Image (cartoon, rainbow, N blue to C red):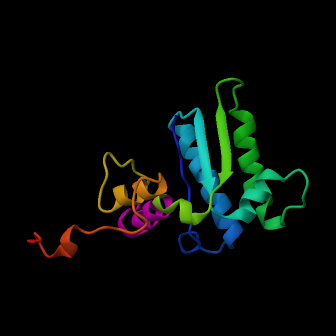
Amino acid sequence: MYYLCVLAFLHIISGLNEDEGFMWGVLTGCIQALQMGFERTYIELDHEDVFQNIRYQEHIVLPPELDEVFRRFNSLHAIHYNRGVTDRKVTSIPLVMNRTAEYLARYGMEHMSVFAEVPDSFADLQSFLDRDMGVGLPFQVFEAFGLGDVID
C-alpha cells in the first residue's frame, strides 16, 4: 500500500485562498501519484472544509473559485479509475494526529525546491512518525539535552 500525504500551505501557492490552496495541493499530489503508477492512494486532509467539499460535492453548491480544481480532480479520478484495481480514499485527520505530514511539508518548503522521495529517516522525522503511530512520547526527547554523556 502506498500512502500520499498532501498538505498545501497558503504562502507557497500565491493568490489563492485557503480552500483553493489545499485543493490544488490535493490535485497536485494525485497527479504525481498517477505519474508514479500508484494504484492505491490515500489522501489525509487536516482541513475539514475541503474534506466536506470533496465528500458532499454533489449535494452542495461549491464556491466558484473551486470549480476548476474540482473539475480537474473529478476528471482525473474518472478517467484513470480501474474497477477492482484502483483504490483512492480521502480521509479527514486532525493536524494533531498528523504531525509527520506537517513536518515533511515544512521541511520541504524550507530545504527543497522539487518533489523528492526520502530514502531514509532524517533529522527529527522518526520522532514525529513514532508519535503519530502511538509508540512515541508526545514530546521530543533529546539525548542528554545536547550536553554529552550524563554521569550518575
The answer to whether one can see residue 68 in this image is no
Q: Residue furthest front?
A: 152
Front one among 136 and 108: 136
Quadrant of the rendered structure where residue 106 is? Answer: bottom left
Q: Is residue 37 above or below residue 98?
A: above
Residue at point 60%, 44% (across, down): 42
Residue 4 in percent (x, y) is at: 53, 47
Front one among 70 and 143: 143
Position of the C terminus, as image quadrant, is bottom left
Residue at point 90%, 61% (across, down): 61
Q: What secondary structure prevails in the magenta region?
A: helix
Report the side of 137 relative to 54 (left or right).
left
Residue at point 43%, 66% (across, down): 138
Report the side of 111 relative to 40 (left or right).
left
Residue at point 49%, 64% (across, down): 102
In the rendered image, residue 42 lying in the magenta stretch gets the answer no
Q: Which residues are magenta?
A: 101-114
Residue 129 in percent (x, y) is at: 42, 54
Residue 71 in percent (x, y) is at: 78, 50
Quadrant of the rendered structure where residue 136 is? Answer: bottom left
- What is the total number of numbered labels drawn onto the structure image? 0
Quadrant of the rendered structure where residue 76 is? Answer: top right
In the rendered image, residue 106 lying in the magenta stretch gets the answer yes
The answer to whether one can see residue 100 in this image is yes
